[in-house]
Amino acid sequence: MRLIRGSSAQTMADKFGRSPAEVVKILFSAGEMATATTSLSDDAIGMVATELGYHAEIVGVEDEAEIDVAEDVDESALVSRAPVVTIMGHVDHGKTKLLDAIRDTDVVAGEFGGITQHIGAYQAHVGEREITFIDTPGHEAFTAMRARGAQVTDIAVLVVAADDGVMPQTVEALDHAKAAAVPIVVAVNKVDKEDSDPQRVRTQMVELGIVPSEWGGTHEFVDVSAKARTNLDGLLETILLVADLEELKGDPTGRSRGTVIEAHLDKGRGPVATVLVQKGSLDIGDALVCGTAYAKIRAMQDELGRTVTKAGPSKPVVILGWNAVPESGDDFREVSDEREARHLAAEREAKTRAAELVITRPPTLVDLMRQAELSEIPELTVIVKADVQGSLGALSDALLKLPQDEVRVRIVHSAAGGITQQDVSLALASNAIVIGFNVRPDAKARELAEREGVDVRLYRVIYDAIDDVKAALSGMLKPEQREAELGSAEVRELFRVPKLGVIAGCYVLSGAIRRDGKARLVRDGIVIYEGRVGSLRRFKDDVREVAQGYECGIGIEGYQDVKEGDVIEAYEVREVARSL
């Protein structure tokens, strides 16, 4: 039985066909004090379901549509649709350049550092056929969509540079593509370079279980050059060939459903979202609901900004008319009218809030001890603002993935949109730094930040922001304590001196012995005592240091049991800066 997280006894009673009193009684017997309208924890929901003979599958509100909608597929209405292709690969192996060459436009020039900043969906034309490409920043968005069950991708194109070969992110991208269970086409890029070796790439891919079709395997390999624009037609034809084997179909009739690829708040147009239609067709005026956001479509545009009046399966469009910015990767579905969309969105928002306010169990002693440990760990507090949801998610995830054992990052607030006065005020109150990605502070925010000394960092490349935060965390690490040997002396004779006690007559074997320096007494290779050199003499004179090859008298502070043949080692402890 699928149940929404934060369900109440009333909701569960309706699902199971029982009375709310019966559910409350089960909870009461288990020691859970709850009324019919109290939002329940996941454990409580699972326990009630088990008592009533069911297995509870707890889902979020974004999966509610799947519970409500179970439409039969009309085979007669299915038509061929364009394949949806995700381009993946290692950083700087030419993913965007390849897509740019295919679309014959210049996206890379407008992207700082030549790195894709946020997800875009584009359509390329091959004769009378179309291919929908999704360009992702790394694999964050791809993974998030797959985790939510949004199987948007039909074919994965893995870009591998012929000069670099297989790199760590190539393997990571391959793992994601395998997990999505989609056909993989390998595009061997940069074959125009002198040091390129396409055969080495094939050999490396075979080691990863991807065998080229020309070597008797099932995976297509295409040698291309995005820069020289060679064999791009061959790549497109290969993609269409793989798509034909998959027999991709879509139903353009009925109410539409699909996935949000990207969403952001536009200053002039309000919340806008790039969506990919998977079933049905979108028309201007349709009412949509997506998570806790809803829309009545005011306008639709393609990737070039041209007006679109109808969008069928596999068609990516930008939709205007949302009441709020929907989450990237969320599913959307069409409803009968705006009133129903508003009602559904409000209902979901209430359920989301209820799920967040679920009464959790009191903390155990272990939890409290863990909290005490965490409170002692230095933390870097940040506020993250980005231009679009996809970039915001990718940047926030990357920051939270940095090592958190000795120092940690705490994100107190993150949102899509420009840096406002409220953001700077929050940073001031929480001693945070503001990280802005592809956004700018407004005049009031800039003035407040300058007046109060709030650090506002602006970036155009995600990796620069991550590197700076990493450097800041490294500066917060406790320095490493390293011992440096200064010298050693052998005890050859013992003297008893009034008021000073036992003085060891020594011969300095190496380095130098310094007065007031740290020292350890070693006997037969075992450390007997660690302390300080209390007194150091040459004949009857007090000296600060005695070098190798000289004799001296050493008194160890707080220790008298020195024996002939012992070795006194002098050392100092140096602090060395560490990095993550």
Image (cartoon, rainbow, N blue to C red):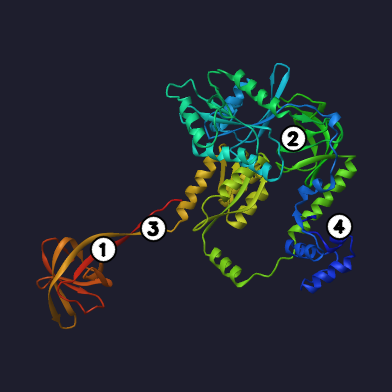
Q: Residue at x 46, y 28 (%)?
A: 200
In the drawing, what numbered circle is on residue 15?
A: 4
Viewer-nearest of discs 2 and 3:
2
Q: Looking at the picture, how far across and down is residue 378, in whole percent?
A: 51, 59
Residue topped by disc 2:
275
Between 577 and 341, the one lying in front of the other is: 341
As shown in the figure, which amino acid type bears the numbered disc 1? Answer: Tyr
Judged by depth in the image, the label closer to the viewer, 2 or 4, is 4
> What distance separates the C-alpha of mark 1 from that of mark 3?
16 Å
- The answer to whether mark 2 and mark 4 are in CB contact below 8 A is no
Residue 571 is tagged as: 1
Q: Quadrant of the N terminus?
A: bottom right
Q: Are marks 1 and 2 in contact (CB under 8 Å)?
A: no
Q: Secondary structure at mark 1?
A: strand
Q: Could you tell me residue 50's position as x and y percent?
A: 78, 64
Distance between the alpha carbons at the discs numbered 2 and 3: 50 Å
